[in-house]
Amino acid sequence: QVQLQQWGSGLFKPSETLSLTCAVYGGSFTNYYWSWIRQPPGKGLEWIGEVNHIGSTNYNPSLKSRVTVSVDTSKNQFSLKLSSVTAADTAIYYCARENDSGGYYYFDYWGQGALVTVSS
Amino acid sequence: SSELTQDPAVSVALGQTIRITCQGDSLRRYYGSWYQQKPGQAPIVVIYGKNNRPSGIPDRFSGSSSGNTASLTITGAQAEDEADYYCHSRDSSGDHGVFGAGTKVTVL
């Protein structure tokens, strides 16, 4: 059974760099893209970016200048860094596994979510 | 294009059938996937690809796609189906993911 467990600080001040990490337990780490998705309070889901096991990344164009997603295959972990945060970055942040088997793209496993608040 | 458009809210009587749609240019190239999210919980995938249900998802959930529109149908809606539903796909470039704004389903 695949499990994604995420952690990271919950409170950041404006202009700081948000940092979250997600550990993957069970299943293969090498055959998937590993993604970050966020959800502001009371709002919808927003795709942030993704990384595969060799470090290839794709980012949401609206966040690209501030986002870094990285991978540590020795620990089966991947991380998110979002720089220069503002109150607009307050959200629940989810990590998720993207499955593209058969040419279909979908998120089949999700982390528990982490509430990140940006406030002075 | 990187947009997926969903109706904000729909309601359905208990036991009746509801169809939720998602429109976007990228759906002409990529199949969508559908996620159910209940308050305080992470989303779960209910339909992906042409019409695939993960293990544990009731068969009252089905999907279809035509042109630039993906649809999720709940046949015989139950009270526990009341939730927010999001569609997802790759954008037209294939390099980015994109979500619809979500549809709030109320079961009356």
Image (cartoon, coloured by chain):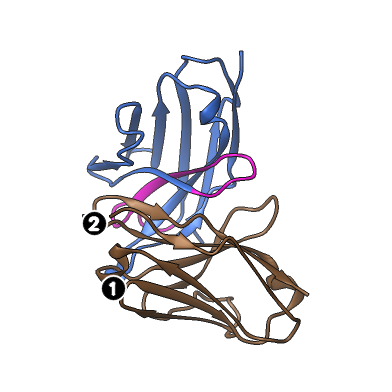
Q: Please, is residue B28 above or below residue B98 in the view? A: below
Q: Residues within 10 Å of mark 2 (few under 14, many from 20)?
A: few
Residue under label 1: A102
Q: Secondary structure at mark 1?
A: helix
Is B20 in front, or is A32?
Answer: B20
Do marks 2 and 1 both belong to one polypeptide chain? no
Which one is nearer the viewer's eye here, A11 or B10? B10
Instruction: Residue at 65% x, 53% y: name it.
Output: B41
Position of residue B12 relative to residue B42, above or below, is below
* Residue kind at label 1, given as amino acid type: Gly
Closer to us: mark 2 or mark 1? 2
- The rendered magenta stretch, by its main secondary structure, is classed as loop
**Could you tell me residue B46's position as x and y percent?**
53, 71
Determine if the magenta segment contains residue A36. Answer: yes
Q: Quadrant of the image for the C terminus of chain A?
A: top right
Q: Could you say which disc has been placed on residue A13 in the image?
A: none
Image position, residue A19 (x, y; %): 46, 26
Residue behind mark 2: B94
Measure the alpha-carbon separation of dots 2 and 1.
15 Å
Can residue A107 be spotted in the picture? no
Identify by letter the chain in brown.
B
Give the residue drawn at x 42%, y 18%.
A84
Give the chain coloured blue. Answer: A
| Between A84 and A10, the one nearer to me in the picture | A84
Part of the protein shown in magenta: A27-45
